[in-house]
Amino acid sequence: MTQRTPKVTVRRNRTLALVSALVKGVVAAGLGLGSLTVLVMVVWISSPYPDSGPGGALRAAAGVWLLAHGAGLVRPDTLSGVPAPVGMVPLLLVLGPVWLAHRAARDAAESQEELREGPREGARDGAAGPSRAGAFCAVTAGYLLVVAGAAAYARGGPLYADPDTLAFPVALVVAGAAAAGVWTAAGRPFGPAPSWSPLAVQEAVARTLFRRRAEAAFRSAAAGLTMLLGGGALLVAVALGRNAGAAQDAFLGLAGDWSGRIAVLLLAAALVPNAALWGAAYGLGPGFSLGTGATATPLGLDGTPALPRFPLLAAVPDQGAGALPNWAALAVPVAAALAVAWFAVRRAAPADAPRARAWSPRETVLVTLLAALGCGAGTALLTAVAGGPIGTGALSEFGPVWWLTGPAALVWTAVIGVPAALLMRLWRLRTPGWAWRRDVPEADGLPVAEADADEAEEGEGDGAGRPRRWWAPWRGRRAAAGEGGRAGPGAPASPAASSVPSPGPAPEAASGFEPYDFLPTDPWHEKGGPWHGKETRQARWASLKQGSGGLMADFPAERTADRASRTDRADRADPVPDRRAADPDGPGATP
């Protein structure tokens, strides 16, 4: 019998792991393509008058799947005979392919980690699995193989992909989703910086303080972007409610049968995120284009719009100058800027931390500006794919202009967010005698380095294991200090509360305060002394009852008298109250 050398075993394991990652990429792409194909075929089967056969429906499904990755489509069958481009990507369709590619890369990278860390026969098998870069490349390659096959198959259909858009942005979207999956499998680390980056960048990323500030800026930017999307969706919903009749006429006029109406409804649902971004761009000020000669802004609709008949387009404002309801859309960027400031101040000056742990005004301004920059970049990226050409001529420009919407979001969040963040910081750091921070001790002597080291642990949750949310800041205070300065159940005592007790009123100032009297000097075992008298027992019982809050019963006078008489008889029968104490060498003594 022959035995494989360790080098052959390691090489074989690496090859199998790479092949497995490649297959996972292929399966992820196949799942996305198959699910969308099933949906398209169901609509085609239910249509009473299909325009093409099953081959055309399958090619159209492949084209729509490529459109979900950002590819530009071309529609060759037009009335003018000139192929018309279709560049508007339904953003709801993007979620499926991106999630599948992300999950495939994450599973491939996690399997490689298990292969390296799991039980193995020899020490040389530790490097049997490929690196994270190998898993990323294998999953991306497998996914792009299916993309290339789908593009080749859809070439002769009613919607085929533009070859120039396959490399960018299709390959970039797939690679980004796979990279995010590998990063998730690695635990979402922030650093270290690549070796080819400048030394100053590597040193900055290596600092814990820099990573925390960057994380706070990222969270604030995400909050501002989410507020913009929510505000834009609210604007679209209000506009559609005001023009519900026009939206209904457009919906019923596009298709006369139920299968066609279901198809229109699915398309409108896939374009809801696009409509939310259009509403956000409208509230920011630049608005959106409705053709080459028309632009809709809060100031009014200029030009003659080229509007196709579609239900969501019924939310477009009427021509003419904007009125007060149109100007109310400016509240959307204001709310986004306040959200950025609020999330930045939550980390800059926590409500349950002493004043020494708060950031300086310079750090607060810097983090808020970085968050505004991230919000502007995210808005520009999303609005770039929310619009696009849907035809030739006047329809070649349709949707928000990203190079105007992104800077507008940056200006709004920076101009309003920075002063709001400073004001919120001052409000949180006001005098401790006020209501908000009355229970927070002033631990001014706490070192700043120690405060920064404990900041991440206190920001994630309270001592009882429950996460502290921004809408319930009292959770952290109650769990850390309790109602009376004591730690909550199952949680350690707060360092600030234990080392620096909060000053309270003097005992003499409390209402109903009575100082304790001195205990009697007579021995306790003398039954005839004042300690065992009836009046003394009644006084002790009344004191215990008052301290228990009324839980104890009244003093049983008769039972106490009987018990006292029995005690006197026992004392006369046995004058020594404790024989073991009087005779330590007796049989009852314990060695």
Image: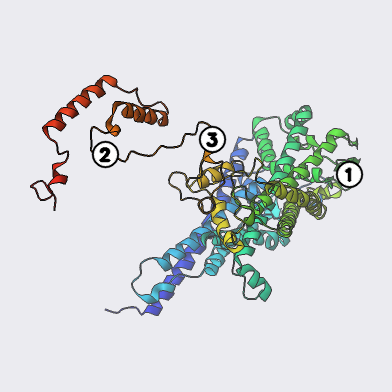
Kind of residue sitting beneath label 2: Trp
**Element type at marker 2?**
loop
Label 2 with label 3: CB-CB less than 8 Å: no
Q: Which colour scheme is used?
A: rainbow
Farthest top residue? Answer: 558
- Structural crowding at the residue carrying mark 1, measured as other residues with C-alpha within 10 Å and reported as few (<14), some (14–19) or many (≥20): some
- Structural crowding at the residue carrying mark 2, measured as other residues with C-alpha within 10 Å and reported as few (<14), some (14–19) or many (≥20): few
* Residue 218 on image: x %, y %: 66, 56
* Residue 223 on image: x %, y %: 67, 48
Farthest left residue? Answer: 587
Closer to the N terminus: mark 1 or mark 2? 1
* Residue 504 on image: x %, y %: 56, 43
Q: Could you say which is closer to the camera, residue 359 or residue 293?
A: 359
Tell me the residue that label 3 is attached to.
510
Residue 571 placement, left or right of 365: left
Between the residue at mark 1 and the residue at mark 2, the CA separation in whole angstroms equals 101 Å
Kind of residue sitting beneath label 1: Ala
Closer to the N terminus: mark 2 or mark 3? 3
Q: In which quarter of the image is residue 280?
A: top right
Kind of residue sitting beneath label 3: Ala
Nearest to viewer (mark 3 / mark 1): 3
Which mark is on residue 579? none
Between the residue at mark 2 and the residue at mark 3, the CA separation in whole angstroms equals 32 Å
Tell me the residue that label 1 is attached to.
294
* Residue 179 on image: x %, y %: 59, 62
Residue 129, compared with residue 300, is above or below; it is below
Residue 470, compared with residue 557, is above or below; it is below
Q: Residue at x 12, y 35 (%)?
A: 574
- Structural crowding at the residue carrying mark 3, measured as other residues with C-alpha within 10 Å and reported as few (<14), some (14–19) or many (≥20): few
Tell me the residue that label 2 is attached to.
524
Residue 189 placement, left or right of 576: right
Between the residue at mark 3 and the residue at mark 1, the CA separation in whole angstroms equals 75 Å
